[in-house]
């Protein structure tokens, strides 16, 4: 019992016991709504976990890039020889950095896609279940009218 004397479960039981034709099964509706909320909660949790995983991986990538940049600057400072040798070394470093950036963006994109896919999958499954529940409720309601 709540502090205001209103108990939703008692109310749902009272409505469910009324068995009037044409009225929906309030207990079934309440249970369906509970499952809807659970699905939304699960989808939100999955989305949040995915966002956290993306943020963690992004931070790891940034730390790695900073370390590699430091090494690249040191490497450039130690290159001896004519300008074309230094330019070739710098070009190799830039190519490697670009390839790594593309790989990292691809990895982050896959993490986001996986996270979103899991969350949407939960919602899609619940939506399909809800449609079946509605069909079942309508079918029961039609039978009770005849």
Image: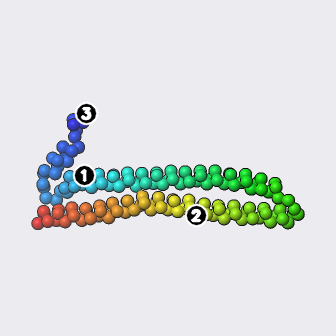
Q: Residue at x 74, y 61 (%)?
A: 93
Between 103 and 68, the one lying in front of the other is 68
Q: Within the image, what quadrant is residue 19 found in? A: bottom left
Labels 1 and 3: the sequence-earlier one: 3
Q: Which mark is residue 47?
A: none
For the residues labelled 1 and 3, the Cα–Cα distance comes to: 21 Å
For the residues labelled 2 and 1, the Cα–Cα distance comes to: 43 Å
Q: Helix, strand, or loop for circle 2?
A: helix
Quarter of the image with the C terminus in it: bottom left
Query: Is the Cβ of the residue at disc 2 closer than 8 Å to that at disc 1?
Result: no
Labels 2 and 1: the sequence-earlier one: 1
Q: Which residue is mark 1?
A: 30
Q: Residue at x 42, y 60 (%)?
A: 118
Between 78 and 42, the one lying in front of the other is 78
Its colouring scheme is: rainbow
Q: Residues within 10 Å of mark 1 (few under 14, many from 20)?
A: some
60 is higher (above) or lower (below) than 128: above
Q: Residue at x 39, y 62 (%)?
A: 121
Measured from the top left, where is residue 31 in percent x and y? 25, 53
Q: Residue at x 34, y 62 (%)?
A: 125
Q: Which residue is mark 3?
A: 3
For the residues labelled 3 and 2, the Cα–Cα distance comes to: 54 Å
Q: Residues within 10 Å of mark 3 (few under 14, many from 20)?
A: few
Q: Which residue is mark 2?
A: 106
Measured from the top left, where is residue 101 in percent x and y? 64, 61
> In the image, is 75 to the left or to the right of 50?
right
14 is higher (above) or lower (below) than 72: above
Quarter of the image with the N terminus in it: top left
Measured from the top left, where is residue 98 in percent x and y? 68, 63
Labels 3 and 2: the sequence-earlier one: 3
Measured from the top left, where is residue 27 in percent x and y? 20, 52
């Amino acid at each position: 019992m709540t502090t205001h004397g209103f108990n939703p479960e008692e109310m749902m039981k009272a409505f469910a016991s009324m068995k009037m034709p044409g009225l929906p099964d309030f207990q079934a509706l309440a249970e369906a709504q509970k499952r809807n909320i659970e699905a939304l909660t699960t989808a939100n949790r999955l989305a949040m976990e995915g966002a956290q995983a993306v943020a963690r991986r992004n931070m790891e990538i940034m730390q790695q890039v900073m370390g590699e940049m430091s090494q690249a600057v040191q490497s450039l400072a130690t290159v001896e020889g004519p300008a074309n040798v230094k330019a070739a070394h710098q070009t190799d470093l830039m190519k490697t950095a670009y390839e790594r950036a593309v790989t990292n963006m691809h990895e982050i994109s896959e993490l986001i896609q996986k996270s979103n896919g899991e969350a949407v999958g939960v919602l899609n499954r619940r939506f399909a279940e809800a449609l079946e529940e509605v069909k079942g409720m309508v079918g029961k309601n039609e039978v009770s009218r005849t």
